[in-house]
Image (cartoon, coloured by chain):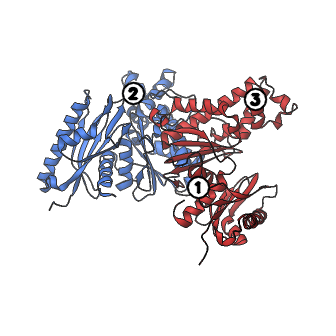
Chain colours: A red, B blue
Amino acid sequence: MSAEPRWIIGVDVGGTTLTVGAVPMDGGRPEAVRVQSTGRDTRGERIVSVLAGMVQATLDELEELHGDGRDRVAGMGIGSPGPLDRTRGVVVETPNLGWRDFPLRDLLSEAVDLRATLDNDANCATYGEWWVGAGRNAGNVVGLTLGTGIGGGIVLDGEILHGTSDVAGEIGHMTVSLDGRRCKCGNEGCLEAYASGPNIAARAVEGIRAGRRSILGDLVDGDLDRVTAATVYDAIVRGDAYARQVMTETARILGAGIANLLNLLNPEVVVIAGGVTRAGEHLFEPLRAEARRRAFKSAVDVCRIVPAQLPEMAGLVGAAGVYKKEAFGSV
Amino acid sequence: MSAEPRWIIGVDVGGTTLTVGAVPMDGGRPEAVRVQSTGRDTRGERIVSVLAGMVQATLDELEELHGDGRDRVAGMGIGSPGPLDRTRGVVVETPNLGWRDFPLRDLLSEAVDLRATLDNDANCATYGEWWVGAGRNAGNVVGLTLGTGIGGGIVLDGEILHGTSDVAGEIGHMTVSLDGRRCKCGNEGCLEAYASGPNIAARAVEGIRAGRRSILGDLVDGDLDRVTAATVYDAIVRGDAYARQVMTETARILGAGIANLLNLLNPEVVVIAGGVTRAGEHLFEPLRAEARRRAFKSAVDVCRIVPAQLPEMAGLVGAAGVYKKEAFGSV
């Protein structure tokens, strides 16, 4: 008779960071976590090999910490940028890593000899927040991750909304300004074209180049190409009025996008993750005000718009939750 | 022992038209249909009394046509503009009819002695198209009705998405232009502010007042206040280049909104209903082109964007479907 499983391995594949850890079956705090830079060589075979090593290290540490061997590990959930084909476990395309039709799930599964599931990274992050984070016990949850891009996920009655071809939840590419800024997806006026980290920085720099006064230039020794969203945040903390204005405008645009989500999906919780949330109330206060101004009152009144509770670990935990749901029918 | 039910009464309450009919249990073509102008006196009590008379007439005709008495009628589904509270069967607010916290379901149910359900009119229309119309057998269906306003409904895996407080599906009030046209909801840049019937007319008239040449003025004997979306359509049929341009621009804006729906919900079918669809390919061709240009390819490739198949009857049929689902567990 095999032992009762106590852990699920969670794997979060990101353009800049790879994260692996052991998630307790009840969604508790991950243990034996490994974090590593994705590195410049993002060829699929190399990343699989790196991930396999990280998984093995996590398994070894589980043995050390708890005396739990492989018989205590139910399987492995993998989160990856997409679009992807969940049924086949294939990453169809991911510009940040340069993959095309890459069978990530099966290659990693075979490499570490664990059964595995694959889902979109932003879906996993939202699912993690719904399972044990800021959206715990909520009916409908929408998640946004503001990073290099803007990822999104939608969880309705405890189920990730995948849609007809696993594309659902692409909140970052919602048009909010018909003839607006060009987005790297080729479209104009996407939410991401304004409110991703790099675009917040780009908008800030454009203003300075157009003559706006700010300490932002000083913070990067005059090299405006080095301004990031984090620099904008640092300038706000130092009292820079222009940086604050950039953040308020970002919040206004995000608030309009979130108002759309409120009117369309009427969620109970909107969870916002990613580095930009470091701006705290400089972001959330004007964002909530704009969402409230734009969306239907009865949608606003029932919705909490809150920061993520598992900022670094949501993807990992959610990926494990996806595996649990698939293998056991519920989390 | 009671007889096997064969019919469900469908009731569609609109700002301009009231429609009542008997829908066969299998969602077949409605019979004994009654259509009546809503009239200027929209007080709730009067409308309930008018509707009760229409329902009675439908019941009488069922008896004449098929010898089917009340024992053959399972119940009644009501569709009404919202927002509404389905659990209590109350219309919370509807600007077009001037109602507030009006217990439509129970008043009409008592007046005609039939058990009843209440749901949003645009939800019902989308549900009808999913059940037996253009979205038949599709997994995820999004419906838009372009009329005095823009109504929307979302059906996922055969379930209407209601959201946390019955607001979900308000597609007409999606912001597509951050600082765009003022909408009657108080917001700026809503889809409805561009593409509802009255706003299509208003945009056409604004262009003419700004000096654009068109036969639109001639079609209304010089009284531009009388231009409607139908006039714009008539001008297109007569070869008016400006009217056609107004429709193309309308399609472009609708296409951007629909691209958002494709990226967010990844539906299999988008069904578009309402008078504006009379413009046919003048509307659908540029609309599909814009959605294709803006949305993710894998979302576009799996989605049909099509006119409604039950244009006048979708609300009625869908309302009956909602009742059937509630009373019998499935349609």
Disc 2 designates what residue?
Answer: B227
Q: Are marks 2 and 1 in contact (CB under 8 Å)?
A: no
In this picture, residue B5 sits left or right of residue A236? left
Disc 1 designates what residue?
Answer: B298
Which residue is situated farthest in the right direction here?
A221
Q: Is residue A37 visible?
A: no
Q: Could you tell me the amino acid type at mark 2?
A: Val
B22 or B204, which is in the foreground?
Answer: B22
Mark pair 2, 1: CA separation: 40 Å
Residue at 26 percent across and 57 percent down: it is B25
Q: Dot 3 lies on which element?
A: helix
Residue A32 at what x, y percent from top left?
73, 59
Mark pair 1, 3: CA separation: 42 Å
Mark pair 2, 3: CA separation: 55 Å
Disc 3 designates what residue?
Answer: A237
* Mark 2 residue crowding within 10 angstroms, few (<14) / some (14–19) / many (20+): many
